[in-house]
Image (cartoon, rainbow, N blue to C red):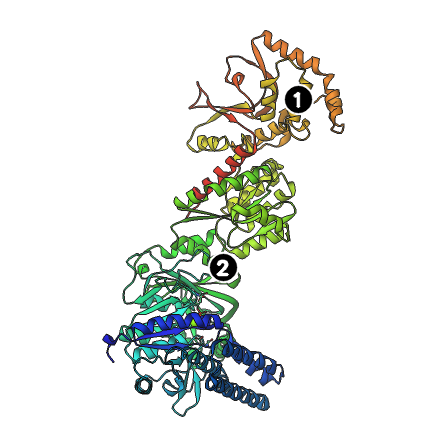
Amino acid sequence: MGRSGGLRVLKFGGSSVATPERVKAVGAVIRNAAKKHRVVVVVSAFQGITNQLLECARRAERGDRTFEELYLALADRHRQACSELLRASDTSTRESVENLLQELRQALHGISLLRYAPPRALDLTASFGERLSATIISGFLNRSFRAPSVDAREMVVTDDQFMHAAVLFDKSNPAIRATLQHIWKSHGPRAVPIVTGFIGSTEDGLTTTIGRNGSDYTAAIVGAALDASVVEIWTDVDGILSADPTAVPSAFVLSQVSYEEAMELSYFGAKVLHAASIAPAVARDIPILIKNTFNPTAPGTLISRKTDPWEGVAKGISSVDDVTLLTVRGAAMVGVPGTAERLFRTLGSHRINIILISQASSEHTVCLAVYSSDAPRARKAIMQEFRHEMQLKSLTLDEKPAQTIIAIVGEGMKGTPGVAGKVFNALGRNHVNVSAIAQGASERNISFVIDSQQKVRALNVIHQAFFETRKRLGLVVIGVGNVGGALLRQLEKQQAELRRQGFDIAVYGIANSKRLLFSPAGIALNTWKEQLDAAQEPMQVEALIRHVLSLGVPNIALVDCTADAKLVDAYPNFVKANMHIITPNKLANVLPWKRYAALTELMRERQKYFFYEANVGAGLPIISTLRDLIASGDTVVKIEGIFSGTLSYLFNGYNGGKPFSAFLQEAYQLGFTEPDPRDDLTGEDVGRKLLILARQLGLKMDMNDIRVETLVPAPLRTMKFSDEFFRELAKYDDAMQRRLGRARLRGAVLRYVGTLQGNAAYAQLREIPLNHPFASTKGSDNIIMFTTHRYSRTPLIVQGPGAGADVTAMGVFSDILKLLHWLPW
Ligand code: ADP
Ligand code: ASP
Ligand code: MG
């Protein structure tokens, strides 16, 4: 049967046959393919069944009678599948299924009597999964066309290494051809054989399996024996992705990968394809196509000699869990010829699979990664082999359990300098510690070992650094009152445009003081309010941080839209969870110097950004202007301005026509002041802004270094706030009136002005000449004037509305954009 025959092998994994519903979808795919081509199908056990069968055997071995319940549940699932998939008249399939279940029960019974389940018995037990699924699927397909089931044990011949038997190709290939020819002879050339994956038998007829996930391998073996034109692996994802999508949400489908790339990725844990499947395909140059049963029109991933013309340096990233790192260290490793060789030979002779080796250039240490299940045997073997060296202490052995290997794979890495540097840079910035590193001899991969706890983060960090051209930023917004609410509205409106520009902003968490809404998939911003109202989880910082850490996404910012001091206390914890901080909340920036310095130092050390444009002048670019001036080498001489929107409004409008207290009460009623207007009148807030600017200039100042004039008369400072306050304040109206009158006589107006000059910072109500820029402010304008060496004769002035939810949110938004632009990618 030549390639021109266009024979296709289609393999359906456990995920494709998880439920009868899914089997029906599989039926549609097969029917379509069979219309155009000669087709052979390979199937896995229904999803989860192999694990359950092995668990049954282990329980039976332990004498744990609950194996029977598990057996019954499993039998039931197959009977249920029969009733949903088979015609009522199809008694023969039902009978075959009952026979298999009966045989399985006997096998388990045998194990429980003997209290012994050697690998050979485990293989027999496991074989029922594929035998049952092939029988039922064949029965289902027989309703519309000929689809006889084929037991691979008739044709896949293996050695007797039970559980991971090696296929004997010289025996298997002719047997496969003969068996299938026979099928087509007796059922007709259009018949579609349904072959059990994963299982085979020894020459003596003992049942074996060829390794977990081995149905892919069966498909490749059958494809190679029949010289198929393509082997199609049908699964539950759109192809091979740049990373495991369950860990890296932004992973994307690779349209073409080379055999070698696919091999490296699957060897290092991408279970979408069994690593062994590549070899038979390569030998005959048969392409492998990965397809999604649930999205059959998606093009999938083509694995062949060619690689994608799109050449990033790296193609994909994968990981292997449950690894132990063994470090052999000591003088005996240096210059004693053959020590390393002895080490590997010993492990080899104990059939311990070394997944990764890394040798320090000093030759002083050798690191080996092995599966944790092999670790005790590996340790024993090494201790035995090197017992003399160990006694003399010229060699030591360290063991580090719970490790994960991460591999970065791509043809483009060959000869590209700096890849390792980029990896470690990205990991370092995100506090992932690497305990060993190795570069594959092929130079097609770099792999490294980390603590398993850090796996998700490491995968995402590397994925972002190597594979993503889009810039991604995750946000957690706390406080959804005026400013937070406005910010979320603005974000929603801009999301599409930002995407177009290559930026992805996802809001993972939203919280108010009571509730926390968190979604690893990102919160849909058009319904955040409803979702938050419905959220069950109480807002707690520790829980929030746990969510963020489990997300593992690099570049997440806390957006604190509260005025909450307790949240500010928790900033260090957020920073330690690798979050940047963006906030209009001034409290962090006015903390006592020691705490402020500790916080900024922590952020520096952790390479996290802290942006707070909205601290001063709401949406006006005050902080950023100041930063730019300093960064570009200018020297600031003086900063002076009207920093309070409320005080600005009050003195822009107060013209003596109405008493000051009445004018204030009106502003209060219009909502232009703080709930207690004294919070505006004390000038405290202006003082805070001056402190924030002073600290920008590098001045080591605290609140008590700032002199502020309060406009609240002394007797009124402690009373409870009520309308009574305005009546009391009326007693001082005359004094204010006189101040205004004096100013007018001198051709001036009153303005509440903050000044920062040299080491002095103060705020007070001042007379401002009419020709001064401060005299012409309107509404609640802020105006800030920077006098610098460069801007000496004409100061640099920033003026505009300096209060209100929308402009404040805009200031926060500008910080978010700044972060997007500044982050290293
Ligand atoms: P099947 O049951 O069809 O054999 P598997 O569960 O064995 O399917 O393999 C498919 C799964 O492999 C996907 O659902 C995905 O979670 C996982 N996976 C891991 N790494 C990758 C990757 N790089 N690309 C695609 N899938 C991957
Ligand atoms: N059913 C087997 C397993 O679970 C083989 C496979 O699914 O490919 O390992
Ligand atoms: Mg699989």
Q: Nearer the viewer, mark 2 or mark 1?
A: 1
The residue that mark 1 highlights is: 664
Q: What label does residue 647 carry, if any?
A: none
- The first of marks 2 and 1 along the sequence is 2
Q: Nearer the viewer, residue 199 or 644?
A: 199
Residue 736 left/right relative to 803: right
Disc 2 crowd, CA 10 A, few/some/many (<14, 14-19, 20+): some
Q: Amino acid at mark 1?
A: Leu
The residue that mark 2 highlights is: 456
Q: Is mark 2 within 8 Å of ligand 1?
A: no
Cα gap from disc 2 to disc 1, whole angstroms = 56 Å
Q: Nearer the viewer, residue 700 or 134?
A: 134
Residue at disc 1, secondary structure:
helix
Relative vertical location of residue 48 with respect to residue 106 in this rendering, above or below: above
Residue furthest top as drawn:
745
Disc 1 crowd, CA 10 A, few/some/many (<14, 14-19, 20+): many
Residue 739 coordinates in the image, percent (x, y): 65, 12
Residue furthest front as drawn:
89
Quadrant in the rendering for residue 676: top right
Q: Is residue 73 visible?
A: yes
Residue 217 coordinates in the image, percent (x, y): 38, 76
Residue at disc 2, secondary structure:
helix
Q: Quadrant of the N terminus?
A: bottom left
The residue under the point 47% across, 51% down is 429
